[in-house]
Image: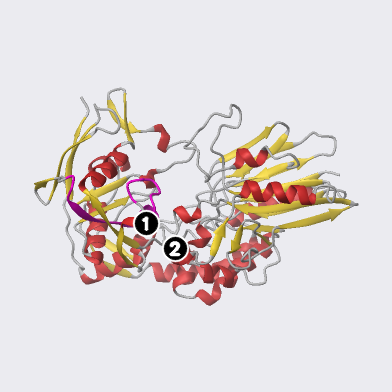
Amino acid sequence: MKTTILSTSDVHGYFLADDFRRPLQDLGFGLAKAATVIRREREKAGDGELVITIENGDFIQGSPLTNYIEKVVPDEAVLYNELAEAVGYDVRILGNHEFNYGRDYLEKVFAGNQTLLNANIVDEKTKQPFIGQPYRIFEKNGERVAVIGVTTQYIPHWEKPANIPGLNFLDPVTVVRDLVAHLQGKVNQIVVAYHGGFNRDLATGEAIEPITTENQGTDLLAIDGVDALVTGHQHRTLADLVAGKPTTQPGYRGDHVGRIILDEDGKNEAAVLPTAAAAEDSEISRIVKPMYERVNAWLDKPVGHVGTNMRITDHFQARLYGHSFTELVNQVQMAATGASISANAIFNDEMRGLDDVVTVRDVMTNYIYPNTLVVEKLTGAQLLEALENNAAYFDVKDGQPAVNDKYLFPKTEHYNDDIWSGVSYTLDLRKQQGSRIQDVQVAGEPLDLTAEYEVVINNYRAGGAGNAAFSHDKIVREVQTDVAELIANYLLAHPQIQIDQPKNVKVLVS
């Protein structure tokens, strides 16, 4: 029997080909397009073929629509299950961003959901999956195929402790190995759906990122008895055979559908199918368009004026020298917490900054994560370490500043470069990493390596994600309001803002 595995991953609440920015464009992604491709692939399958469709996590967070549902109409989160049913997903997996809204929200959204697979995130008291079931077995023509669902165990490094109370994140490799041993002899094939990616090159086995427990796909593929692996999390588009085992990762926001074919004669296949040219599925559109109308009305509410210099036109230069938009965010963060030093990131190159008239839409499409704020107390030496860690984002290529390739592959990580306010320094790119930051001053005084300074960052950074100088044991206070809401409230309270280009960073290249 031939088994076909179709998958999406990291849809992040983009259900139509609309990124919520204006003017509206068909950007070639979205669940509605992916649903059309999935339907076509199902129709191509023969009568004796088993087709299993997997939604591989990060489905209910990541867009203004998902933020609107969680904040304004949480009882309408049933929409996510309606959409999943319309696509026809047989299996769903928890993503790391699913936890951004907290355990209680997750349990409500997935209550009674029979398609959710979760083998490695367990309640610390019961030792059982806190929601979902570890695996599911599909049967056709006497053949049995098991799908095991696991999620990256790295979530506690990023997530606020308040969002994951009473949960243990077990090693997915150990969990899958044990389940394979349990299932062998009872099924013909075993597929693993993993919300995580790869930290090694699939061809060479060489490390392509720091070897942590975040992306353990290579180890999962190596388990005897695993026949195929669906991955996600890194937003990569890949399909390959590793020692004959097919694996896929189907991109981001529904821009690709992964397809794995397990053939009984051993002629396995792996592919990723682009969705850009597909028409939007009419049923998905029907279900979601009323919510889009409400979200867009909410997004169009004006909140203030910021002048004419907050548009981001050169993202690299903004990261190198700072920008009036990042200065605004830092001012908001310092005002909300009382800290005198602040850092925030330009998350991706889709961020446009602000025009003079600012709406909720502008805030939400620039600050896309439901982050909250954390103040940490750092010594001067630790503050210098944090600045040096950020300096590693930059490289010199052909005599010009450039982005370090480590922040571009295997996953683009612009969100791990912070832009600072409340501290001035010289960034000397002529020097080796670790010794690039010179002439640091705080409040007009030279940095004292033994003094203590309060720094405000977002909760993602607070655990050391992207910058090991930060850690939870340095936290002195928190503000639990989402940063996007803080920005909007700040603009409402200061409806006419003018912020000049910051001049706190001097860059030396040659």
Q: Write the start and end of the magenta stretch as one range.
A: 449-470
* Distance from the alpha carbon under mark 1 to that under mark 2: 10 Å
Return the residue at label 1.
Answer: 472
Place of residue 306 in the rendered image (x, y in percent of width and height, measured from the top left): 22, 60
Packing grade of label 1 (10 A; few <14, some 14-19, many >=20) is some
Quadrant in the rendering for residue 113: bottom right
Look at label 1 and name its amino acid: His
**Circle 2: element type:** helix
Look at label 2 and name its amino acid: Pro
Quadrant in the rendering for residue 305: bottom left
Place of residue 371 in the rendered image (x, y in percent of width and height, measured from the top left): 39, 60
Q: Is residue 49 visible?
A: yes
Place of residue 339 in the rendered image (x, y in percent of width and height, measured from the top left): 21, 60
Q: Residue furthest right?
A: 142
Q: Is residue 23 left or right of residue 15?
A: left
Asked if residue 161 is among those painted magenta in the image, a careful observer would answer no
Q: Residue at x 58, y 73 (%)?
A: 108
Figure check: 430 above or below 502:
above
Return the residue at label 2.
Answer: 161
Packing grade of label 2 (10 A; few <14, some 14-19, many >=20) is some
